[in-house]
Amino acid sequence: MTPDDVASFRRCIAAGGVALFPADTVYGLATDPRSEEGVERLYRLKGRAPSRSAALMFFRLELALAALPELGERTRAALARLLPGPVTVVLPNRARRYPLACGEDAGRIGLRVPLLEGELAPLSAADWPVLQSSANPSGGSDAARVQDVDPRIRMGVDMVLDAGELPGTASTVVSLVGYEEDGSYEVLRAGALPSSALDAVLR
């Protein structure tokens, strides 16, 4: 992946397009989180119900924290320990930011900041967020390689960023909705970040 690839990625997202791209876990689909048309296309490609949430991805942690200024200090400190990494964090969204990523519950938002090393490093130059979801039919297997992505999805996107083979295990999903008040958290989906590592960071 090159800086030119990232520039093309930005142009695709800015135009409301849908891109197939690599994260630190599996391949995903991305679009502008404010584009109703882009989000509708992404969901249609996956066969995903519009009522279900996606995740908001930033490519640098400081950009994510700046975009969600209402988060409390305890939660922000936890995010600084968890991210970047292979985890999706569900957070309170009292300001109802990025509603297209939130499905039926605009009071909560999923946040991803991938760890961008090696072939993925050029993505760290991206200074805009994307709405993202895994590049598979809803309920299907995650893709570790571009050629593993369902052909209908590959044919339906506007661009493909290929970073070779990825680890292949989706992110761990953890809710920090109550963390600010009482330090509570809940694993909603087991994944690439082991529970023992999560416990070590959050307890």
Image (spheres, rainbow, N blue to C red):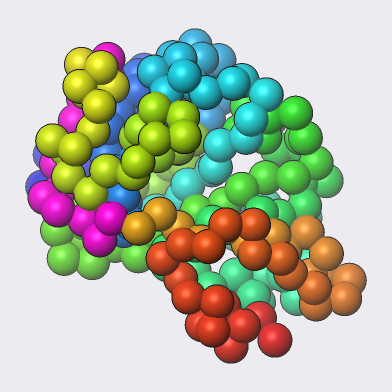
Q: Residue at x 67, y 45 (%)?
A: 109
150 with respect to 46 (left or right): left
Percent of width and height locating residue 133: 45, 37
Q: Is residue 123 visible?
A: no
From the image, give the main secondary structure of the stretch colored magenta: loop
Q: Quadrant of residue 149?
A: top left
44 with respect to 95 (left or right): left
Percent of width and height locating residue 180: 82, 70
Of 186 and 181, the residue lying toward us: 186
Q: Is residue 28 visible?
A: yes
Answer whether residue 52 is magenta in the image: no
189 with respect to 155 (left or right): right
Q: Quadrant of residue 170?
A: bottom left
The single residue placed furthest to the top in the displayed view is 37
Q: Residue at x 80, y 73 (%)?
A: 184
Q: Is residue 150 above or below residue 37?
A: below
Q: How many marks?
A: 0
65 with respect to 94 (left or right): left
Q: Quadrant of residue 90?
A: bottom right
Region in magenta: 156-168
Q: Is residue 176 above or below residue 14?
A: below
